[in-house]
Amino acid sequence: MTLENLEAEVLALPQDSQVILLSRLLKHLGQSRENDAEVELSWGEEAERRDREMDIGEVTGIPAEQVFHKIRGLLQ
């Protein structure tokens, strides 16, 4: 099977199945390599900063349903 054949099969799947597959692939890729300690620290700091901003009302979160709806629209 070629990469092009695999791509065609994946694109023929229903969108929900494509999203699940993408999630699984990203999870697998994240496990297949060691995380750089500096990158992990930076992401941790970023997450804490964003959490503080939401706590003090500086930014407003977007419901996951809206985010996924927008992503699905971009995939079409």
Image: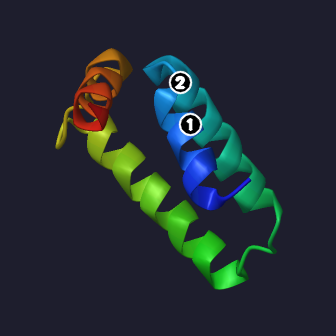
Coordinates of residue 52 in the picture (x, y in percent):
36, 47
Taking the spot 53% from the left edge, 65% from the top edge, the residue there is 43
The image's mark for residue 13 is: 2
Determine the secondary structure under disc 2: loop
Inspect the image, locate mark 2, and give the three-letter code of the amino acid beneath it. Answer: Leu
From the viewer's side, name the closer residue of 9 and 56: 9
From the viewer's side, name the closer residue of 25 and 62: 25
Coordinates of residue 18 in the picture (x, y in percent):
53, 30
Determine the secondary structure under disc 1: helix
Q: How is the image coloured?
A: rainbow
Inspect the image, locate mark 1, and give the three-letter code of the amino acid beneath it. Answer: Val
Residue 46 in the image: above or below residue 65: below
Q: In the picture, which quadrant includes the C terminus?
A: top left
Q: Is there CB contact under 8 Å for labels 2 and 1?
A: yes
From the viewer's side, name the closer residue of 16 and 3: 3
Residue 67 in the image: above or below residue 4: above
Residue assigned mark 1: 10
Taking the spot 51% from the left edge, 42% from the top edge, the residue there is 8
Coordinates of residue 63 in the picture (x, y in percent):
30, 20
Taking the spot 59% from the left edge, 77% from the top edge, the residue there is 39
